[in-house]
Image (cartoon, rainbow, N blue to C red):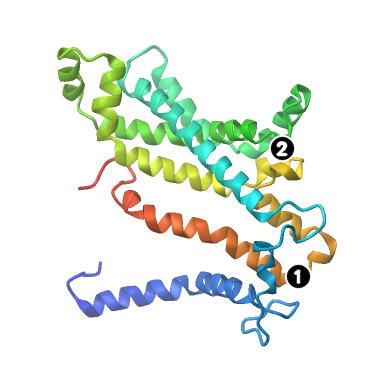
Amino acid sequence: MFEYGSKWKKALLYLILFVISMPILILYIGLVVNSFNAENQFMLIPQNWTLNNWRFLWQKAIMEGYPSIWEVVFNTICFALGTMFIEVAAAIFASYVISRWKFMGRGYLLKFIIILRGFPAVVLIVAIYFILRALGLLDNLIIVMFIKAAIEMPFAIWTMKGFFDNVPWDIERAALIDGASRVQTLFKVVLPIVKPGISALSIFAFLAGWGEYIFLTTFITGKSNWTLSIYLNSLLGSGEMFLNYGLLAAVGVFYLIPTLIFFIFTQKYLMRVTMGGGIKG
């Protein structure tokens, strides 16, 4: 174990971490650099530079039949926020009931939630697709929001349950004795205490929605409902665009920038949360 009081040992620790992370850093740096590459090939150090790869930002469409990038961004933000709201709201109520009420089958329900968390959601795609097609619900972003939230629900419930378990029952009992209802106790007493957990879960849910690809690609068929993940994938299979590495790199960097900014502004909430569902500080 390193003694953090020693500057030299700290420097050595940071050096080791830097060396370990170097391959990943090189990949991201290469992606950014090649987004300005005028050559039609992936290069570590481009010889000719251009802004033409970023033309999708000011052009209405980069190809005929393609939607505007800003329409796609709007769809992506709506999908990520909608998924976050559905997942967090449902997880709060479900985990609160599981945490506070002792009912028949509670232990089996908790085990079932853990099993669902380890179940590969991708195997459900075919079944869900045929159900949505039979109901005429394909190409509907709202429906995919609910599907994504449902898939992430076991993780969300288990995470929030840990926070509710750490809230002393005496606090709720005092509120109930003072005349507060169960709903008032939940919203005015308990939720402010577990706010760091709600913040952390909201961050994870938003990022999961922002980066969703499999379900969106499978269930969204119309270009008017494209998100950035579908937009980027379409460039890979669009024939003449297949070898346009500069454009692919530029769209990829554009896709990453909001996630990076979002993480920078929300990391303080994540740092306050321990892995066991507790709260630091």
Horizontal side of 3 relative to 156 (left or right) equals left
Q: Nearer the viewer, residue 118 or 152?
A: 152
* Residue in the picture at 75% in, 70% down: 244
The mark found on residue 144 in the picture is none
Q: In which quarter of the image is the N terminus?
A: bottom left
> Where is residue 226 drawn, in percent x and y?
69, 46
Q: Which class describes the residues within 10 Å of circle 1: few (<14), some (14-19), or many (20+)?
A: some
> Secondary structure beneath disc 1?
loop
- Indicate left or right for 247 with 150 as reference: right
Q: Give the residue displayed 24% in from the left and 80% down from the top.
A: 8
Circle 1 residue:
244
The residue that label 2 is drawn on is 219
Residue located at (27% from left, 41% from top): 278
Residue type pointed to by label 1 = Asn
- Is residue 80 something that shows in the picture? yes
Determine crowd level at label 2: few under 14, some 14-19, many 20+ residues with C-alpha closer than 10 A: many
Q: In the image, residue 200 lies at what x, y percent? A: 38, 44
Q: How far apart are marks 2 and 1 (CA)?
A: 27 Å
**Residue 101 at x, y percent in the picture:** 32, 16
Q: Is residue 73 left or right of residue 39?
A: left
Q: Is residue 219 above or below residue 68?
A: above
Q: What element carries label 2?
A: helix
The answer to whether residue 277 of the structure is visible from this angle is: no
Q: Tag count in the figure?
A: 2
What residue lies at 26% left-to-right and 33% top-to-bottom? 192
Residue type pointed to by label 2: Phe
Q: What is the quadrant of residue 217 in the picture?
A: top right
